[in-house]
Amino acid sequence: MNILFMGPPGAGKGTQAERIVDQFAVPHISTGDAFRLAMKQGTPMGQKAKEFVDQGLLVPDEITNGIVRDRLLQDDCSKGFLLDGFPRTLQQAEALDSMLADMGRSIDHVVNLKVDRGLLLARLTGRRICKSCGSTYHVMFNPPKQEGVCDKCEGELYQRSDDTEEKVGTRLDEYISKTAPLLAYYEGKSQLREVDGEQDIDVVTAEIVSVLRGSR
């Protein structure tokens, strides 16, 4: 089964992806992991990507597409995959369809986790990290016993600079504007499956499994 996962930052894609790959015995492929693997292995595409990364430049679509293609051709993807973080643009989506067609394959399901923007802001801005040991907390969902103090080492908790409401809001708005055409694209191909990501984690997992098994 060939699956795409979509959803804004804070929607819980990572958590759900771990559960889904266990149930369906397919690899979880993120673009970041694919890049690191290609560069570590020194593949032709990995070497080209490294040239851009080392200069702090964005990697062109042609190279990104090539790295994803190489990853999907590996043996562990023979029975399917769960792709997370790619495609990010309409052009990448079209390139993915083309490369899969060359392999005699296609996307089966595009799962989009829907979460209200206000809840996403609460999830993403509530994170707190210990300066001493790096333990992570959340003011709403996983608060420390004493406000501002780590349970494990009594270190000071802080909020990362990119977790402020202003910066998180900018990231969310950028994500929404960039992915709207993608969602329309997959909806037009009858591949889009919308799942309410605001529910309990186990309920979300059950809904995704139901969607993938064709029972919803």
Image (tube, helix red, strand yellow):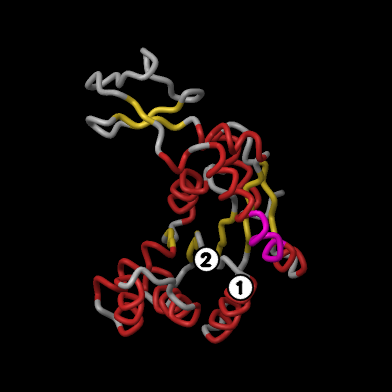
State the residue at coordinates (69%, 64%). 191
Residue range in magenta is 176-183
State the residue at coordinates (48%, 50%). 17
> Which quarter shows the N terminus?
bottom right
User: Residue 151 in the image: x percent, y percent?
Assistant: 29, 19
Element type at marker 1? helix
For the residue carrying disc 2, how many other residues have a C-alpha within 10 Å: few (<14), some (14-19), or many (20+)? some
Is residue 115 placed above or below 25 in the rendered structure?
above
Q: In which image quadrant can residue 196 be found?
A: top right
Is residue 63 placed above or below 144 in the rendered structure?
below
Residue type, label 2 = Phe
**Mark identifier at residue 86:** 2
State the residue at coordinates (50%, 60%). 85
Near-viewer residue (122 or 31): 122
**In this view, which residue lies farthest toward the right?**
188
Specify whether residue 4 is painted magenta. Answer: no
Near-viewer residue (49 or 193): 49
